[in-house]
Image: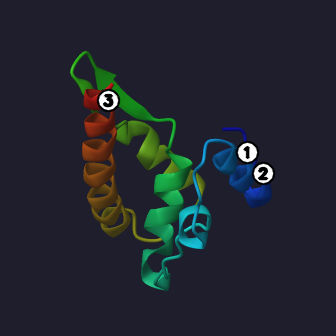
């Protein structure tokens, strides 16, 4: 299937060509509220998306040296708390990434 961001009409057409009918909840992004007190951690996590360490057994975790440099660069006010919050997201993301890799 070919589709670009926001091109749900093309996605619907491609799916229909295979006899698949996509409901609106299949093509619309899920929206979650972001509490302001977690904004720094989410922002930092997204900025670190290419800083994963990996081994032959899969993804290990984020490179904290880079994480802390980015926290400093972007003026994170409370790096210790932000890192703790980021680690919650990191562990969940790591598990999801590794499960996806196992399926291949």
Query: Who's the residue at 35% across and 59% down the image?
Result: 86
Kindly state the secondary structure of the residue where label 2 is placed.
Answer: helix
Residue ranking furthest to the top:
56
Q: In the image shown, does 40 or 15 lie closer to the viewer?
A: 15
Task: List the residue tagged with mark 2.
Answer: 10
Indicate the position of residue 11 as horizontal and vertical percent values. Answer: 70, 51
Answer with mark 3 or mark 2, whichever residue precedes in sequence. 2
**Along the horizontal axis of the image, is 91 left or right of 36?**
left
Query: Which residue is at a point 40% across and 70% down the rendered structure image?
Result: 78
> Local crowd at mark 3 within 10 Å, few (<14), some, or many (≥20)?
few
Residue 20 visible, this orientation: yes
Mark 2 or 1: the one toward you: 2
Q: Are marks 1 and 3 in contact (CB under 8 Å)?
A: no
Q: Quadrant of the C terminus?
A: top left
Q: Which residue is mark 3?
A: 101
State how far apart marks 2 and 1 are (Cα): 6 Å
Marks 2 & 1, CB-CB < 8 Å contact: yes
Sequence-wise first label, 1 or 3? 1
Name the residue located 37 percent from the left edge and 65 percent from the top edge: 82
Q: Tag 3's secondary structure? A: helix
Q: Which residue is mark 1?
A: 3
Pointer 1 local density, CA inside 10 Å: few below 14, some 14–19, many at least 20:
few
For mark 1, give the secondary structure: loop
Q: CA distance from mark 3 to mark 2?
A: 28 Å
Q: Is residue 53 left or right of residue 1?
A: left
Give the quadrant of residue 8.
Answer: bottom right
């Amino acid at each position: 299937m070919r589709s670009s961001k926001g091109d749900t009409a093309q996605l619907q057409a491609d799916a229909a060509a295979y006899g698949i009918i996509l409901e609106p909840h299949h093509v619309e992004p899920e929206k979650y509220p972001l509490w302001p007190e977690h904004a720094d951690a989410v922002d930092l996590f997204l900025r670190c998306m290419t800083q994963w360490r990996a081994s032959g057994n899969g993804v290990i975790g984020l490179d904290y040296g880079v994480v802390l440099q980015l926290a400093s660069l972007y003026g994170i006010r409370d790096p210790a708390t932000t890192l703790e919050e980021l680690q919650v997201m990191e562990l969940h993301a790591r598990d999801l990434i590794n499960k996806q890799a196992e399926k291949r």
